[in-house]
Amino acid sequence: MAKLLPDSIINGMLDYIRARVTRINVNSTQPTTYAEATSTYKLATTTITSTGLTVGDGDTSGRKFAVSSKTGLTIDTTGTAAHVSLSGSTGSTLLLVTTCTTAALTTGNTVNIPTWDFEIRDVA
């Protein structure tokens, strides 16, 4: 018997994040909590709304959302960027963490986050 996870269920997971996201953070270490993403490991942050995440077909299969680029984020703390996280202010929620190309960042300068996507593939 084949496995099936309907697109509507995957969309529900992605829509959950879209409905709650308010910030995109550049982090030095992989955060596992809201406090780590928005304070402890935060090097830079900016606001983002649900319009910055577009849900569509996955590149390989399943569904994905594309996160729009952000430019000119002021670097608050010197460190090496290694992760990007999405968080929401409602309930102080950490929503998603991904890796990024490592880069040395210096306080007072700016950093850009290119467009990236998060894909949930069909079950196999």
Image: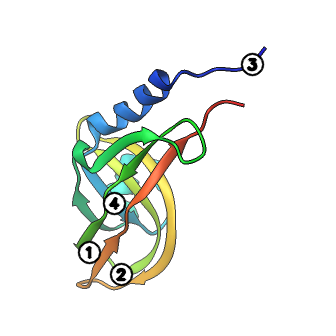
Identity of the amino acid at label 1?
Answer: Asp
As drawn, 20 above or below 7? below
Label pair 4/1, CB-CB below 8 angstroms: no
Closer to us: mark 1 or mark 3?
3
Q: CA distance from mark 3 to mark 4?
A: 39 Å
N-terminal label among 2 and 3:
3
Closer to us: mark 3 or mark 4?
3
- Picture coordinates of residue 84 (x, y %)? 42, 60
Find numbered disc 2 in the image and state the secondary structure of the residue it sits on: loop
As drawn, 17 above or below 109? above
Label pair 3/4, CB-CB below 8 angstroms: no
Observer able to see residue 114: yes
Q: CA distance from mark 4 to mark 1?
A: 11 Å
Q: Which residue is mark 4?
A: 25
Q: Which residue is mark 1?
A: 76
Residue found 49% across the figure and 29% down from its top: 10
Q: CA distance from mark 1 to mark 3?
A: 50 Å
Q: Which residue is mark 3?
A: 2
Residue in front for this viewpoint, 34 or 49: 49
- Picture coordinates of residue 69 (x, y %)? 31, 63
Closer to us: mark 4 or mark 2?
4
How many labels sit on residues? 4
As drawn, 4 above or below 50? above
Q: CA distance from mark 2 to mark 3?
A: 50 Å
Identity of the amino acid at label 4?
Answer: Asn
